[in-house]
Amino acid sequence: MTASVNSPDQRDPGAPPRVGLAYPGATWKEFAHLLANLPATLLGFVYSVLFVSLGVGLAVTVIGLPVLVLGLRGARLVGRGERGRARRLLGVRIEEPSPIPRGDGGGGVLGRLWEGVKDPVGWRTALYSVIRLPWGVVTFAVSLVSFFALWPVLGYLVRGMANVDRAMVRGLLSPSDELERRIAELESGRGVVVDTAAADLRRIERDLHDGAQARLVALAMGLGLAKEKVIEDPEAAALMVEEAHGEVKLALQELRDLARGIHPAVLTDRGLDAALSAVAARCTVPVRVEVDLRQRPAEAIEGIAYFTVSELLQNVSKHSGARSAAAEVWRAGDRLLLQVHDDGHGGASLDGGTGMAGLAERLGAVDGLFVIDSPQGGPTTITAELPWRERGQDRAGRRVTGKGGERKR
């Protein structure tokens, strides 16, 4: 059932409530939250003081750190409950913080315990529980007295105290803003990279099994039969050897194509300009290639740029119906920009089944951007951005000197 836009429950939490005998549902939710503050903060205060006192008091013993770590993990559960209560009653939606990192196990048991002790989320929740006890007493008392003695201004008092509660929840129970978001992005990007690598390995295995391997098996069988016939029927054996020679050529071509799909030799030897020119020569429509780089980027960035443009040009050949296309690459500050343009019928999108979504995920995994401008009827312009890293920087951890050129647009 769709709620009306003017329903009292849909009002802005910051808007003042109505004065009168009847208050909207949002005010009663805030009232319930304020009344529940006393038992909730009392339990949180007792728990936080108990685990901190035990953990610090037993720190000189073997069980001190484990007690403190278990207490901080329990504090995380307290924080989750408080975020849920604020979400249901105050309308404050806060993302859950990232879990405690497990580490690589290099520090052993002591290292894992130390990671648990350093958990900022648990400590912030403990601080929240301690400083909120006086506030919980105040909000409970004021709300109860207002309900019986100050009914006309109950809504204003409830709204003011609820806004203070919202600020406390946002300030102490929210994730560590930029750092938490960055961790979530990196975890998502790592999953994309792992999935992409696994898919590429499966593709290579399938291509080898169905292509070159099958041809080489047939070649071995043919040469075996020719060996048996070389004395009895030399002409037939010569014919079979000739067929085997043709199979060898085809197998070599398939292996070359497969190697080019993994990492083309021309990209390693001569860079993006020559590699993209070779891709453009295989495209079914005329493609103008322009690469304006004074120096080559890092190998990983160069490889992603190559495969992005290559796949976009394949889409131009298969789906665009274009008569001409252009591929441009240039550097702008600390970004490597790629742009592929065609005069086809347009309509390209991330959900169009042409691999665009996969390209966007791969670029996003390395802090890249992927923008599609493709109205129905065309033309289509796809722009991709990658972070610029100097060649050798990501391997040796050092920055190669040199000034990159910028393309004027």
Image (tube, rainbow, N blue to C red):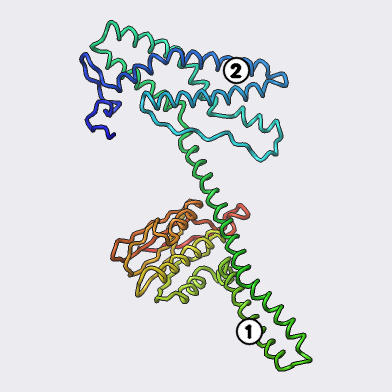
Taking the image as shown, residue 228 lies to the left or right of residue 400, namely: right
Return the residue nearer the eye: 389 or 176: 176
Please, is residue 274 above or below residue 354 in the view? below
Marks 2/1 in contact by CB < 8 Å: the verdict is: no
Q: Residue at x 45, y 73 (%)?
A: 280
Amino acid type of the residue tagged 2 in the rendering: Phe
* Neighbours of disc 1 within 10 Å: few (<14), some (14-19), many (20+): few
Q: Which residue is mark 2?
A: 51
Front residue of 248 and 226: 226
Between 13 and 226, which is closer to the camera in this rendering? Answer: 226
Q: Is residue 260 left or right of residue 409?
A: right
- Residue 227 in the image, given as x and y percentages of width and height: 76, 85
Q: Earlier in the sequence, mark 2 or mark 1?
A: 2
Residue underneath mark 1 = 246
Is the C terminus in the top left, top right, bottom left or bottom right quadrant? bottom left
- Crowd rating for badge 2 (residues with CA inside 10 Å; few <14, some 14–19, many 20+): many
Residue 279 screen position, x and y as percent? 48, 72
Q: Nearer the viewer, mark 2 or mark 1?
A: 1
Residue 337 image position (x, y, % from top left): 43, 60
Residue 77 or residue 239, whichever sits in front: 239
